[in-house]
Image: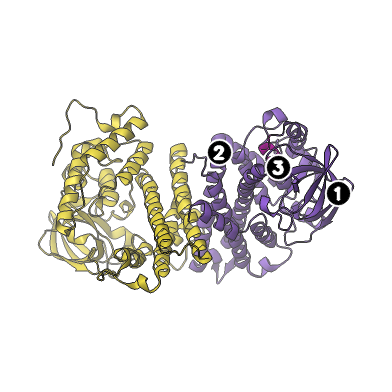
Amino acid sequence: MTVSVASDTLHPRDAATDEEFRATLREFLATQGPGPRPRDPGERVAWTKAWHAILVDNGYAGPSWPVEYGGMDLPFNRQVIYQEEIARAKVPGPLGTGLGIVAPTIIRYGTEEQKQRWLRPMLRADKVWCQGYSEPGAGSDLPSLRTTARREGDEYVVNGQKVWTSGGLLADMLFCLVRTGTPESRQKGITYLNIDARTPGVTIRPLKNIAGGKGFAEVFFDDVRVPVENRIGEENEGWPLVRTSLGHERAAGAMNQAAAFRRILTELVSLAQERGLTHDPLVRDRLADFEIRVRLIRYNAERVIAGIMAKGEPGPTSSVSRLMITNFEQELNEFAVDLLGPEGIIDKGSDQAVQRARWLQGFLLTRASSIGAGTAEIQRNTIAEQVLKLPYDPGMPPR
Amino acid sequence: MIGGLTEEHEELRETARRFLADKCGLSQTRALAEAGASRDDAVWRQMAEQLMLQGIAIPEEYGGAGFGPVELALVLQEMGRALVVAPYFSTVALAGQALTTCRDERARAHWLPRIADGSITATLAVADGTGEIDARAVETVAARDGEGWRLSGTKRFVIDGLSADLLIVAANADDGLGLFLVDGSSAGVQREALPNLDLTRPLATVALDRVDAVRIEDDAATVVAKVADLVAVALAAEQVGGASAALEMAVDYLKLREQFGRPIGSFQAIKHRCADLLLEVESAVNAVNAAASLLAVGDPEGPIAASVAAAWTSRAYTHVTKENIQFHGGIGFTWEHDAHLFLRRAKTSELLLGTPAHHRARVAELAGI
C-alpha cells in the first residue's frame, strides 16, 4: 500500500499558489485515499495506521510540523486549507492524542535525539501516544498529582496511577506528568516523562464509559523503570511545558470542526423533516437556534483565523470557542433524542433504533465535552481570569 | 470566508470612539434624555463636518464617505456603546440606507447630500402597527392627486418620528406598494411622542391625513426587503456596542467592589457568568461583522446572516444588561446609576424592528428547515 514520493518532484508544500496547493492535495486525497472503513475494530486500527503512513511518506502529514521530522511546515493559511481538504475527504484522523499535545512539546523542548526517535513514528501512527496527566485525586487540580518518579542512576522508578487515558488500550507510549519533588511541591515538583507502555510494571485496564464504550483506560505504574533520556526538559520543570502548542495549529482545525457540526445539524434537520416534525413551531424555533449557533461557530472560527493572519493573534474569540461548541453539541444531541420521543431511547442493540441510535449515543458521549481536557467550569475560570482579568480566588493555591 | 477588520477600520473605530467619549458621555446622554431632547445640535454638526459620520455609507458623489454596511456597523457599535442621544440610527441606518438602496436618482441626488452634511434628519416608517420593516404589514393608503400623491394612515413606533425633517413612508397605491417622501412639517402630519422604555431614543406615533407626498421611483417591495436586512444588521451592530459597554461596566465594578474582604469578581459564581457573557458578546461581534460583510458584497448568504446576527445579538444584549444590574447589587437598582439606561435600550431594541423569535423563524425559513 505504500506509495513512495519520487525524488525529483517538489514537496507538496511548495505549490506555487494556494489554489494549486489545494488542488494537488485534493487530487492526492481522492486518488490515494484509504478506501472503505473496515467494520472490525482491529482491522480498522491497521487501516488507520496504513493511511497515516501513506500521508507521511508522500509529504502530506503534519501541516504545522518541521519538515525534518516528517511534517510540512506550512504557513498558517495553508494549514487552514489543509484542514478543510482533510475534512472534505473524510479520511481517518489520528490514533491516540499525542499529535496535538506531546508532539508540540517534543518539537519545542525535546533534544535532537528525542525528536529523531519519537516524532516520525508518531506521525506515521507506527507508535500510538496517549496521555497520562489526570489521576483519581488530581483532575481539575492537576498540580496536586501524586504519581511519583524516583531517580535511580540513569532511570526513574515510577509508581502511581493515571486515569481517563483516551485511547489507552492502543497506547504504545504514554506522555506523563510525574512528581519528582516533595509531595507539597505542586507545580514546582513536576517532571514531563514519556513512558513506553510495554515496560514491565505498566498495567493498562479498560474503563467503560457511560455509553458502554471502551475508548479510555486507567493506567497503573508499579516500580516502572524509565530511562532518564525519556524526560522532556529538566527535572521538576515539566509544568510550564504542559500547554505547549505549535503556532496556531488548533485554530487551523477549527474550520473543519465547524464544517463537521454543519453536517450533523443538516442530518438532524433531514431526520426531523422525514418524520414530519418541522411544522411544529416549537421544533422550528429550536432548530433555528441550532442553525444560528452552527453559523456562529463558523464565524467565530473565521474570526480567529483572520486575527492570526492579520495580527498573529487569535484574539478573545479563541478563548470562548470551545465553550460555544460544548454547549452546542450537548444541546443538539439531547434535542435530537427529545425530537424522537420514546423512540429516542431505543439503544443500538435493537434493530428498531433510529439511525443506529447515533443521537442517543451522542447524548451520552457529549457529556464528556464539558469534562475532558479541562472541565467547562475550569474553562470559565480561565476565560474570566485571563481574558476579562477578573481577580484570582484568594482561597486557591498560587498559580 | 469573512475577512478581519483592516487598519483603516480600526482607525475609524478609534476616531469615532474618542469623539463620542469626549462629546457624548453618559452624563450628557442623561441630560439630553431628561430634557426630552432628540440631540445636541453642536455635536450633530461636528459629527457630520469633522467625522463625516452621517455620510459614512453614502456614495462620494452625494457627498458621503463612500463606505458601506461594514463601516456603518463600526460607527453604530460606537454609537451604541456610548448610548448617544441623536437621530443617527433613524437618519443614517433607516432613511439613509433606504435612499442608497433605491434607484430613484432624483430622490438620491436631492436628499443624500443633505443627510451626509448633517443638515437634515430623517426616518423610515413601513409597517403601520408594529414599526417593522415589513412590506406585508403596510396599511397606509396612497391616493393620486394630480402629479403627486396624498397619504393617509397611522404609523406607530416611528423612531425619532417627532423630530425628523423627512419621513420615508411605505403606503399602498393603486398599483401596489410604494415608498413616499413626506416633509415632516407638512399639513396633515400629526406627530405624538410615544412614551416608552428607552429613555435615550424617542419614538412617535405619526398620523397622516391626506398628506402631500412624492413617490420614490423604484420597486418598493424589493427596496424594503433589502433595507430590512441592512437595518437588522445596523441595529445588531448598535446592540453589540451596547453589550460590550455593559460587560465592561460590569467587569470594572467586579474588580473594585469588595465583600467578605475580597473583590466580588474573584468569586466563581460571578466569573462563570462573566465567561458566558463574553461568549455571547464575542459571538455577537463576529455575527455582525460577518453579516455586514456578506451584505456589503451582495452575497446570497447575506439575508440569513442578518437574521442570525439580529436574533443572537438581541438576546445577548438584554442578558448582559440584566447581569450588569445584578452584579452591581443595590446601587445597580438606583435611578442614578447608568446600568438601567443600557437595560432599557437593550430590551427596547430587542422588541423593535423584529423580535428574536421573528428572526429565528426567518432563519428557519431561509435555511430550508
Q: Relative to the observer, which residue lies in front, B25 or A165?
A: A165
Q: Relative to the observer, which residue lies in front, A131 or B318?
A: B318
Image spot of residue A339 (x, y percent): 42, 67
Asked which secondary structure carries label 1, the reply is strand
Chain whose colour in the figure is yellow: A
Of labels 1 and 3, earlier in sequence is 3
Kindly identify which numbered label has been placed on residue B91. none
How many angstroms separate mark 2 from mark 1 (CA)? Answer: 37 Å
User: Residue A116 occupies which quadrant of the picture?
Assistant: top left
| Crowdedness near tag 3: few (<14), some (14–19) or many (≥20) residues, C-alpha within 10 Å | many
Of labels 3 and 2, earlier in sequence is 3
Residue at image x 73%, y 36%? B217
Of labels 2 and 1, earlier in sequence is 1
User: Residue B295 occupies which quadrant of the picture?
Assistant: top right
Residue matched to label 2: B298
Image spot of residue B34 (x, y percent): 80, 58
Q: Which residues are magenta?
A: B94-103
Q: Report in which chain the residue with disc 1 lies.
A: B
Quadrant (top left, top right, bottom left, bottom right) of the N terminus of chain A: top left
Asked which secondary structure carries label 3, the reply is helix
Residue at image x 24%, y 31%? A11
